[in-house]
Image: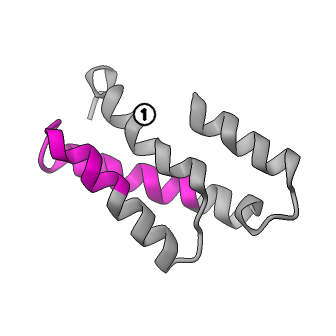
């Protein structure tokens, strides 16, 4: 999965970067995935669920100071894999 490959590049390639710290990696992926599951569950698999999930994820990651750019792709993975996801 692409977001986790990009996370590895940050974590191992530039480990001193603020975006590659454990708080950002774990918090960013957790926040982004939970928000997208809510966006998928509440309005359903609609055209705007993806945009809403990515936008909210970025905003909340910035508010909680857990910004991790690869985590911004998690909503895309969740929405595109929604057919196989059992809620």
The question of residue 46 being in magenta is answered with: yes
Q: Colour scheme used in the picture?
A: one colour
Q: Main secondary structure of the magenta part?
A: helix
Q: Residue at x 59, y 69 (%)?
A: 66
- Residue 76, relative to residue 36: is it above or below? above
Give the image quarter of residue 25.
bottom right
For the image, the number of numbered tags is: 1
Counting from the top left corner in percent of width and height, residue 34 is at 39, 53
Q: How crowded is mark 1: few (under 14 residues within 10 Å), some or many (20 or more)?
A: some
Horizontal relation, residue 64 to residue 35: left or right: right
Q: Which residue is drawn at 58% across and 66% down?
A: 67
Start-end of magenta stretch: 28-54
Residue assigned mark 1: 77
The question of residue 80 being in magenta is answered with: no
Give the image quarter of residue 32.
bottom left
Horizontal relation, residue 22 to residue 43: left or right: right
Looking at the picture, tell me which residue is in the foreground, 24 or 51.
51
Q: Which residue is drawn at 80% across and 64% down?
A: 17
**SS label for mark 1:** helix
Work out which quarter of the rendered image holds the N terminus and state it: top right
Looking at the picture, tell me which residue is in the foreground, 37 or 50.
50
Counting from the top left corner in percent of width and height, residue 41 is at 20, 45
Counting from the top left corner in percent of width and height, residue 76 is at 39, 38
Counting from the top left corner in percent of width and height, residue 12 is at 86, 46
Q: Residue at x 24, y 51 (%)?
A: 39
Q: Which residue is situated farthest in the top direction here? A: 84
């Amino acid at each position: 999965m692409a977001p986790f490959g990009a996370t590895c590049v940050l974590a191992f390639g530039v480990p001193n970067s603020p975006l590659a710290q454990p708080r950002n990696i774990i918090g960013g992926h957790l926040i982004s995935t939970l928000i997208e599951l809510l966006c998928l569950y509440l309005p359903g698999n609609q055209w705007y669920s993806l945009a809403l999930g990515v936008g909210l994820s970025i905003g909340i990651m910035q508010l909680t100071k857990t910004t991790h750019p690869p985590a911004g792709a998690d909503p895309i993975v969740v929405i595109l894999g929604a057919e196989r996801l059992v809620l």
